Image: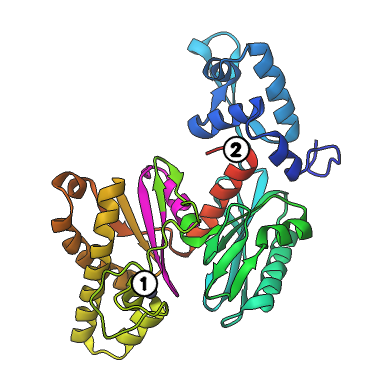
Amino acid sequence: MTAEDVDRWSSLQIQREIPGSSQGRLLQLLHQNGDRSRADLARAAGFTKATVSSLVTEMLEEGLIVETRRRPIGGRGRPAVDLNIDRENWRVVALDLSHDDGFYGAVLDLSGRVLHRDSILSLAAQGEVALQMAIELAERLCAAAAGRIIGMGVSAPGIVDADGVVLASHNLRWTDVPLKDVLLERFDLPVSVENDANVAALAERDRVGAQSDLMVVKLGYGVGSGIIANGKLIHGSHYTAGEIGHIASGDSADYRCVCGRAGCLEATLSLPRLNARLSAADERDRAEILEDAGRILGNALAPLVGALGTEVVILTGVSDEVADSLVVAARDAMRPRLTEESWASLDLRISPLGDDLAFQGAVSLVSSAVLGVP
Ligand SMILES: [Zn+2]
């Protein structure tokens, strides 16, 4: 079969049929365990071999899975054929709407390999202009994606609900923008929209060796975080979990936050505010500003880490040099505020994925929404 076969399921059909189905159960097992034979799958899923065999045949025809390698059993007899998710066959279109100089996008395969990059640069695009710009970038990426697109994952600044509506985004000047529906109607593909810090947290969760209890703190126009507990993203009842920007923990009473109060994290750590202070300072003052900012960050994070049992806190959005200083000061501030156990197991660091966090997280988002894999 070729990718052009018209009788293949569309990605939207896959999204409707697979999660929660018997095929979905097999995909989950392959996602979690890698290469497995039909017999392995039957055992793990509790299905008969005949059932697995027929499900596997359908999924092979569909291009969802692929036969991988042959292991001779005990060196003799018939070789066994392993199966795995066909990660190279599918394309994910990823959009990152959280930069202040424009929108960035990429086409990736399901293993997270970036195959193509594109961007539309425009300073501070907002409102309807920003929406049209996102659509144009998505169009370009879909056109460039050679292969079957399984879905589109969008990392958006602001508060995003479960239906992919951007309820409020200060930088984009969006209120109740149904971004998922707009893109779904336009592209006829599964679309997932999620808050940018949450997307970053998914990316970190799914890296090899990453923890299932982690928090990504994203410094940008505001200060946000994505929290993963027991392997799952926490949204909160109003989709505002992780919105730590207006936790009052600082002592910079001289500076009012955009929310009207003093002492918010954003008043110290939002990039416009932090960069303005750093650029006006000499080297000694710079060190002091960063130490102060890191201490305020640590003060805010300590009770969250203690309460949630978070093991890894990852800082992203700033240059390595700035992040290094912030991490050192935040760690010092957290130590006396945590129990010995929490402190001993805590890993506070900078993300190695950098700007690609949004793209890697989009792959996680789409895999989960369309294939039902965690
Ligand atoms: Zn505030």
The answer to whether residue 310 is seen in the rendering is no
Report the image quarter containing ligand 1. Answer: bottom left
Q: Is residue 66 magenta?
A: no
> Mark 1 Cα within 10 Å, few/some/many (few <14, many 20+)?
few
What amino acid does circle 1 point to?
Answer: Ser
The residue segment tinted magenta is 199-226
Q: Is residue 205 magenta?
A: yes
What amino acid does circle 2 point to?
Answer: Gly
In the visual, does 335 lie left or right of 274? left
Give the quadrant of residue 50. Answer: top right
Q: Earlier in the sequence, mark 1 or mark 2?
A: 1
Q: Nearer the viewer, residue 310 or 24?
A: 310
x and y percent of residue 248 in the render? 30, 70
Give the quadrant of residue 36. Answer: top right
In the visual, does 211 lie left or right of 343? right
The answer to whether residue 295 is seen in the rendering is yes
Helix, strand or loop for disc 2: loop
Q: Which residue is mark 2?
A: 372
Q: Which residue is mark 1?
A: 319
Residue at image point 42% right, 62% down: 243
